[in-house]
Image (cartoon, grey):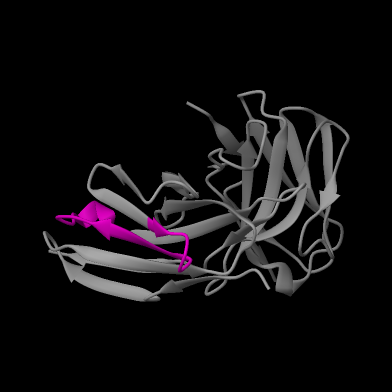
Amino acid sequence: DVKVTQSSRYLVKRTGEKVFLECVQDMDHENMFWYRQDPGLGLRLIYFSYDVKMKEKGDIPEGYSVSREKKERFSLILESASTNQTSMYLCATIPDSHSGNTIYFGEGSWLTVV
Amino acid sequence: KNQVEQSPQSLIILEGKNCTLQCNYTVSPFSNLRWYKQDTGRGPVSLTIMTFSENTKSNGRYTATLDADTKQSSLHITASQLSDSASYICVVSARTGGFKTIFGAGTRLFVKA
């Protein structure tokens, strides 16, 4: 079974703090993604990565950055957290090609910015 | 504009009853459609995936249908159980050079005893 692990399930941070959300997958998948999920909205893509040290902006990258130093690890960084970044963050991975392959999700990280 | 619309937003049914969730999409060019189940506080888990040539796919008590002409899909749940209470998300991918996947907002299903 594919395992996608998000190390922090619940976080509370103050406005202006730097926040790191870590995601680790154990199946040697090349493609990794960060989404945020808000009530009444579908999942929205923040950033994704095809390979180590490679990153691409998704639909809502503003206020976020990412790091992929190793194939199995994809980190989402909030340089200066704001209250509108309170959300559930989901990490996902796909084996090789987006089309026709199942997306595997982590359990989610609930971030509250106060 | 690529969109995925799901209905109803929420649904309450009695245990043992059947229900059908709807998904309409405008994603083009179409590649595949997936249904995911997301328990409260958990990540989504795949139920079915269908490509253009498939019009039905089953996974236990879950049966998904796809009409690529009308751009509609449905997820039918048979003999519902309390554990079916969850959000069900329709996900449509476009056949492009890069990654283009659109998520629906989900249908929240409550199954009560």
Residue at x 52%, y 66% (from the top left corner)? B104
Looking at the rendered structure, the number of numbered marks drawn on it comes to 0
The answer to whether residue A44 of the structure is visible from this angle is yes
- Location of residue B48 by image quarter: top left
Q: Position of residue A73 (x, y in %)?
A: 73, 32
Residue B30 pos. (x, y %):
59, 56
Q: Could you tell me if residue A105 is visible in this image?
A: no
Above/below status of A27 relative to A16: above
Q: Is residue B77 magenta?
A: yes
Where is residue A64 drawn, in percent x and y?
82, 58
Question: Residue B33: within the magenta?
Answer: no
Which residue is pictured at 44% across the width and 52% down the height?
B36
Work out whether A110 lies above or below A52. below
- Of residue B22 and residue B96, the one placed in the foreground of this image is B96
Which quadrant does the C terminus of chain A fall into?
bottom right
For image coordinates 27% across by 59% down, the residue present is B76
Decide if residue A49 is on the left or right side of residue B43.
Answer: right
Q: Which residue is located at x 41 percent, y 46 percent?
A: B54
- Which span of residues is magenta-colored? B66-84
Task: Give the quarter of the image for residue A98.
Answer: top right
Closest to the observer, B51 or A26: B51
Left or right of B102, for residue A107? left
